[in-house]
Image (spheres, rainbow, N blue to C red):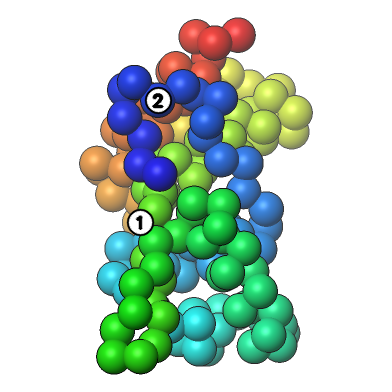
Amino acid sequence: MTMSRATAMSELPELTKAEYKILNVMWGEGEFSIREVHETLDSDWALSTTKTNIERMHRKGLLHRRNLHGMNVYRPAITRPVGLARWVRFFADHVLGMDTRAVVSMFGKSENISDEELAELEKLSARLKDED
């Protein structure tokens, strides 16, 4: 579920905290088994909880899955900016009471988001604003 210009902004996912935590481990890192995600997460979840979340995310279209030598491996189906767009909007509107663009600009100082991701997030945020 990557976002093309033709995709409606209403199709941007509203990620749960658990989904965000899992995607944050996976973005930009290739493919992961459930165990690899679980071992990388900073969480006290049981492995079965990680498995349940990952399988649900696959069904929701947030993760791609393929079989690699008899084991399922997963990779994100959405980019980091697509995953962040609605969170940024909610935070701007309901927590800070700021314009979304001002909140997006704060990401420019982060080492966790690339220039390309920042540009995509800026475009998505502007389109969300236009939908108001």
Answer with the quarter of the image where residue 10 lies.
top right
Quadrant in which residue 76 is drawn: bottom left
Q: Amino acid at mark 1?
A: Glu
The N terminus: image quadrant: top left
Q: Nearer the viewer, residue 16 or 116?
A: 16
The residue at 34%/72% (across/down) is 66
Horizontally, is 125 left or right of 111 in the view? right
Q: Which mark is residue 7?
A: 2
Question: Which residue is pictured at 31% across the width and 63% down the height?
Answer: 28
Frontmost residue, 16 versus 114: 16
The residue sitting at the left extreme is: 116
Left/right placement of residue 130 relative to residue 43 reads: left
Q: Quadrant of the C terminus?
A: top right
**Real-space Cα separation, disc 2 to disc 1, in angstroms:** 28 Å
Which residue is depicted at the point 44% across and 18% down? Answer: 126
* Mark 2 Cα shell of 10 Å, populated few (<14), some (14-19), many (≥20): few
Look at mark 1 in the image and give the residue it sits on.
111
